[in-house]
Image (spheres, grey):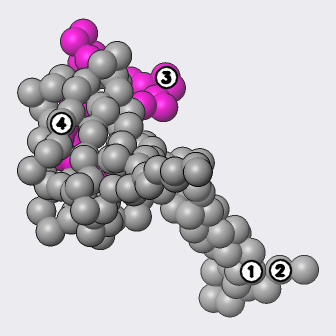
Amino acid sequence: MKYRMNGGDLWPFPEIERLRSQINQILDEDSGVCSTGLFDRSASPRLDVVETDDAILVACDLPGVAADDIELDVVNNVLTIRGEKRPRNGVDENYKNYRRETWYGSFQRTISLPESIDADNVSAELTNGVLSIHIAKREEHKPKRIGIKVK
């Protein structure tokens, strides 16, 4: 049964369904990258952070991004990776996308780091589309092994 008032449709379900669909698109975890930094953008590269006895290791997936288009900063124990992924050569903006699962544009990831890092001892390299960042720990924060003498 539908209700009409002044020729308009008062049945709310089509509008509710449209709204539900839009909210699901926004909240769909598979549609974008989960970013946890305050200034991270919705289209951001995925990354892994691992802690060893000697360092913090960060691996960031950046396929198709040139090393010249990436900036790294470590300030106040916060690592910031920012850059831009440009469209591939031969892709024209006037083309109609048949299917698009990759993203283009600027990106930024921010990661809080532990107090134990040595911000003056950071190295990074880009190999096969993976940015590997090595952030050393300060000596006083590295575990000390104590030998045991046997008598």
What's the residue at 33%, 56% (across, down)?
142
Give the SS element for disc 1. Answer: loop
State the residue at coordinates (33%, 47%).
55
Identify residue type, mark 1. Trp
**Which circle marks residue 2 in the picture?**
2
Dot 3: what SS?
A: loop
Residue pointed to by mark 1: 11
**Magenta region: which residues?**
81-110
Mark found first going from the N terminus, 3 or 2: 2
| 4 vs 3, front mark | 4
Q: Is residue 97 magenta?
A: yes
N-terminal of the two: label 1 or label 2? 2
Q: Label 4 amino acid?
A: Ser
Q: Which residue is mark 4?
A: 123
Q: Nearer the viewer, residue 83 or 76?
A: 76
Q: CA distance from mark 4 to mark 1?
A: 61 Å
In this rendering, is residue 130 above or below 24? above
Decide: is 37 above or below 49.
below
Q: Nearer the viewer, residue 102 or 123?
A: 123
Can you name the residue that lies furthest to the right here? 1
Depth check, front residue: 35 or 58: 58
Spatial distance from mark 1 to mark 2, Cα to Cα? 6 Å
Residue shown at 31% from the left, 33% from the top: 132
According to the picture, the residue beneath numbered tag 3 turns out to be 98
